[in-house]
Amino acid sequence: MDAPDNFADRLAQRIREDARLIVLRLLADQPHETLHSTHILAELRRFGIRHDRDWLHDELQYLAARDAITITPAGSVLVATLTDKGERHLRRDIAINGVARPSRRGDAL
């Protein structure tokens, strides 16, 4: 993918990267590391990320294509589950391209 060349494109790219990190963190916070897309959408809105379900499903597909999560269709939603690779990204052991890097302990999001 080409690098964004204007502010709006760069901002949209950053929002996608941040949203992907937020998704991984949300999943890690769950007892079974699993949530469905309706719950994820609600949580993203708390961070000021307001998009529709199709947008989120594209982002979940992006994470699944990089083995950060698995997804299972369930009616009109997708159920996302964190993988070991997604957890390794959160621990900063690896970096997944297109996903914001987690801050170090004690740093802000």
Image: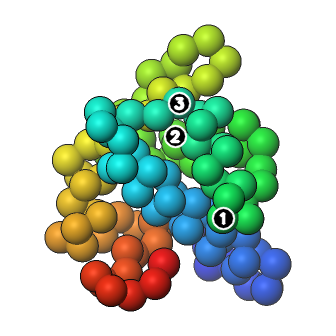
Chain-order first, disc 2 or disc 1 = 1
Q: In the rendering, which numbered label is found on residue 64?
A: none
Q: Which residue is mark 3?
A: 36
Mark 1 vs mark 3, CA separation in Å: 18 Å
User: In the image, 102: left or right of 11?
Assistant: left
Q: Which residue is mark 2?
A: 61
Residue 50 in the image: x percent, y percent? Answer: 78, 55
Q: Residue at x 46, y 84 (%)?
A: 108
Residue 33 in the image: x percent, y percent? Answer: 33, 39
Residue 48 in the image: x percent, y percent? Answer: 73, 65
Mark 3 vs mark 2, CA separation in Å: 13 Å
Query: Foreground: 105 or 62?
Result: 105
In the image, is residue 35 above or below residue 44? above
Question: Across the whole image, how many numbered discs are drawn on residues?
Answer: 3
Query: Foreground: 28 or 54?
Result: 28
Q: Amino acid at mark 2?
A: Gln
Chain-order first, disc 3 or disc 2 = 3
Label pair 2/1, CB-CB below 8 angstroms: no
